[in-house]
Image (cartoon, rainbow, N blue to C red):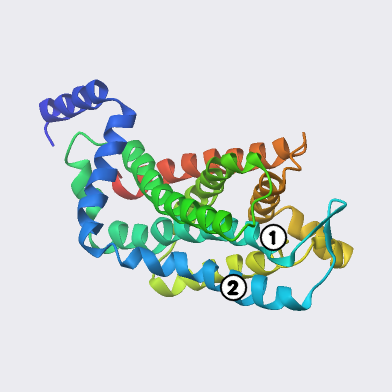
Amino acid sequence: MSALTHLALREERRRRGALASAGVVVHRNYLTYRRMWWLFLSGFLEPVLYLFSIGVGVGQLVTGFEVDGREISYAAFVAPGMLAFAAMNGTLLDATMNFFFKLKFAKTFDQMLATPLSTRDIALGELAWSLARGGIYSTAFLLLMVVLGLVQSWWAVLVVPAALLIGVAFGAVGMALTTWMRTFQDFEWVTVATLPMFLFSATFYPVTTYPRWLQLFAEITPLYRGVVLVRELCLGTVGPAALVSVVYLLLLGVAGLLVVRRRLDRLLLR
C-alpha cells in the first residue's frame, strides 16, 4: 500500500467516525445472513426447551420455592437464568466460531483492512453484530416470559439492556480468546468453560445450596452476575448490589474489546 493510499484511507476513517465504520461491518454481516435467518432459531430454541422441560416440567414437583424472602414458582426462578443464558449463547455463536472462520479461513478481515476500515472498526462491528443476535434472543425470551406470566415487576423493562451487557462481556471475551484459537477443535475449551457456568450459576437453583468453595467460584463467573441481575429485574428486588453486576460485566467487556483490538493488530497488520 502506497503512502498516498494509506493517508487517503486514514482520512476517510477520520471523516466517517468509529460508529459509522462499525455500522458498515454490521451491514455487511446482515447482507450475508439475511437469506439464512432460520439459522438464528437454533440458538433461541435451546433455552426455551430448558425452560419448558425443567422450569415448567420439574416445577410441577417443586412447591414453596423461596427467593429473597418471597415465594415464587420454580419456573419464575429458572426463566431469568435461561434469559441470561440466551444472551450469552446468542452472542457467543457469532463471537467465537463465526469470528474464527472470518479471521482464519475466509480472510474477511484482511479484505476489510484494504478499505478505510481499521481493526478497531472490525472489533466494534463484530461485537455489535454478535450483540444483535443475543439481543434478539433476549427480547424474544422476555416476551415469552410475559406471556407465561413469569415477570413480576416493571423493572423488567431493563432486562434487555441488562442482557446486552451480558452480551458485551461474553462477546468481547469470546472474540479475544478466539484470536488464540488454532483449529475448530480448540473451541471445545469454550464448551468446557461455558457448560459449568450454565449449570452452576444459579440458573436452576440458588448457589447457597452448594459447598462454600463452589459457591465462591460460581459468584465470580460472569454468567452468575448476569443471572442475578436479570432475576433481580424480573422479580423487582433491585438494590445497590446490582451495580456490582453492572460494573463487573462492563469492565469485562471493555477489557475484552481492548484485547481484541490489540490481537487483530498483531495478527493482521504485522
The image quadrant of residue 17 is top left
Q: Mark 2 or mark 1: name the one nearer the start of the chain.
A: 2
Q: Nearer the viewer, residue 209 or 76?
A: 76
Q: Nearer the viewer, residue 152 or 120?
A: 152
Q: Nearer the viewer, residue 215 or 104?
A: 215
The N terminus lies in quadrant: top left
Q: Which mark is residue 185?
A: none
The correct choice, above or below, for 241 with respect to 209 in the image is above
Query: Which residue is identified by label 1?
Result: 76
Q: Position of residue 124 (x, y in %)?
A: 38, 40
Q: Which mark is residue 52?
A: 2
Q: What amino acid does circle 1 point to?
A: Ala
Query: What residue sits 21% from the left and 44% below the top?
Result: 112
Residue type at mark 2 is Phe
**Location of the C terminus (image quadrant):** top left
Q: What's the CA distance linking mark 2 and mark 1?
A: 11 Å
Rendered view: 40 above or below 124: below
